[in-house]
Amino acid sequence: MTYNDISSHPLRPFPNFISVSKAKDLSIIPENYFSMFADNCPCGSERMVRLHQNGTSITAVTCVDPRCPFKLKFQVNDVFDKFGYKGIGPQTCGRIVWAIKEELGYVSLYEVLVNGPKYCKIGDSAEDDFIGALRHIEQSKLNLGTFISYLSYPLIGSKFEDIFRGISTITEFTELATSEGGLISFLSKRGVRSIDVIFYLVHFLKEIEQLYLYFEKCIISSSTNIVPICMTGRMVTSHGAYTKADYLYHCNLLAMTDDGDKLYDVISVDTISKASFVIAGADSIAKKTTKYRNAVDREEFLKKSGYISENDKFLFSPDEFFLYLLNGGEHSE
Ligand SMILES: [Zn+2]
């Protein structure tokens, strides 16, 4: 695969990249550095570099093939790491990837995680390690966005949580994207505007769906909603002052029905953009802290762009938010 193959895709990805060989022709890579930049990846595909500062310097070099087995080796290692199985290492992951490639003639993350044990008889303790790591994934319980972000796809990894917030199946995702004017406009509304990221997502969506169907039992269903809140300032209510951890604990108590069922999980996040609600203490309002001012701007933006209605709130006082949860997430006005 060459840089031209990939950049002529209808989405025109990687506009800021050129092939290593072209970078050499244009002297962007100076001659004395040629030996440090191989034109091709050991997989056979061309390598490309990202241009920086009007093309006078380069900041990254990578194989053009999104399915490069050498990249997959590190991806697999990263996946096991994220699911909490530490120390399997890229070397063992590389052996698994190559064993499958040899057997099937191709290899993908799906083949590694789903059919790996069938094809991959590498023997010794590495095989036990691999089986143990897979079991770790099978026993996980995560929401869809987190689950997919743990699959460590290039560039899109951490963005999945934003893309899939409040969505619990891939079908729901594609339906929502269609109803909101197509994938690109949907992604842009959720803050994903890089054409390279969109390209990877389109490229891997089918495989992500297959992995989702296989690991479906590890995904927490939509009935367990995650409500991310960002707390700023001191959580002082008419009943007294809470530490942030204590305030969060009480929010979760209010999320419980009389029968003891949990309606949603309230979690704490650090950044305004990741929060569904911001709870601002009176002190942060009085001092007009940056976080408070950002939250005011965010609320205005959400209303303007129609994410929340004019009567909905994004920014609460500690008392108001307790009341909001007490009313089951409905507004008291
Ligand atoms: Zn490669």
Image (cartoon, grey):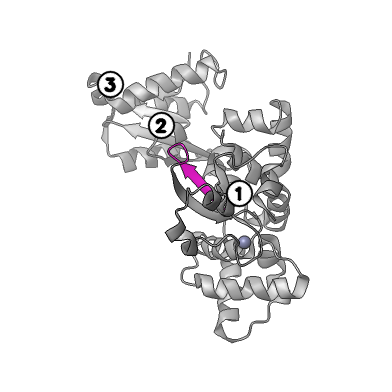
The residues bearing labels 3 and 1 have C-alpha atoms spaced at a distance of: 36 Å
Residue segment shown in magenta: 48-55
Q: Which part of the image, by quadrant, shows the N terminus?
A: bottom right
Q: Which mark is first along the chain, 2 or 1?
A: 1
Residue 15: which quarter of the image? top right
The residues bearing labels 2 and 3 have C-alpha atoms spaced at a distance of: 15 Å
Residue 53 lies in the magenta stretch: yes
What's the residue type where badge 1 is placed?
Ile
Residue 152 visible at all: no
In percent of width and height, residue 20 lies at 56, 53
In percent of width and height, residue 297 lies at 40, 19
> On the image, numbered disc 1 is attached to which residue?
220
Residue 40 visible at all: yes
**Looking at the image, in which quadrant does ligand 1 appear?**
bottom right
Residue 211: which quarter of the image? bottom right
> On the image, numbered disc 2 is attached to which residue?
272
Q: Which mark is first along the chain, 3 or 2?
A: 2
Residue 102: which quarter of the image? bottom right
